[in-house]
Image (cartoon, rainbow, N blue to C red):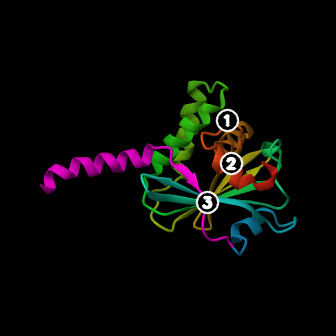
Amino acid sequence: MAIARRPLLVGAACALALARPAATRAQAPATATPPELRSEWPDTTPAQPQGRARMRFLGLTVYDICLWAPATVGADAIDRQPLALEIVYRLGLRGERIAERSLAEMKRAGTAIDEATATRWLAEMKRLFPDVADGDRITGVQQPGQSARFHVNGRFVGELRDARFAALFFGIWLAPWTSEPQLRRQLLGAAA
């Protein structure tokens, strides 16, 4: 009997890593600015949480996400403002699946991403995104018009210096074309 269930569990785990979960309200607000954000924006007002959400799939919490910024992020200017998305994972996921899903969501923007660019971005994300377990935290920081910088559990792991990548990556959650408009509204709060 256990042998018959194993393919089902493996299939469900694979689907979980690739699925687009639905957003629900996160439960507890963050109270302190993540240390990596103090080093990213040392000359600005400390980053504040603007909004948060919880991603679920098949009844499981996949991750909690919080939008941090030194100033209110306007819904019409997300690619022109410094901001960070802090994702705290609530279950284990493979880094390569996170990268693949991110690229698939970026392609939803409606602008063509040529194959060479897609291949380069995917390779960079696979390099930057580790396998995660419950409690692991990936923080992506947008330097407007310049790059996306990434921290894992507070440690800087790398940067992708490409303004178009940054705009599309953060757009996964914040752009009008997002597959999760409810999550976008929760993150942007009153600015949505």
Q: Are marks 2 and 3 in contact (CB under 8 Å)?
A: no
Tag 1: Cα neighbours inside 10 Å, few (<14), some, or many (≥20)?
A: some
Q: Secondary structure at mark 2?
A: helix
Q: Write down the residue under mark 1.
A: 177
- The three-letter amino acid code for the residue at tag 3 is Arg
Quarter-wise, where is residue 117 in the image? top right
31 drawn magenta? no
Q: Pick whichever of labels 2 and 3 is earlier in the sequence.
A: 3
Q: Write down the residue under mark 3.
A: 25
Stretch of the chain drawn in magenta: 1-30
Instruction: State the image coordinates of residue 136 (x, y, percent, origin top left).
Output: 52, 65
Q: Nearer the viewer, residue 90 or 94?
A: 90
Q: Pick whichever of labels 1 and 3 is earlier in the sequence.
A: 3
Q: Pick whichever of labels 2 and 1 is earlier in the sequence.
A: 1
Q: Secondary structure at mark 1?
A: loop
Tag 2: Cα neighbours inside 10 Å, few (<14), some, or many (≥20)?
A: many
- The three-letter amino acid code for the residue at tag 2 is Arg
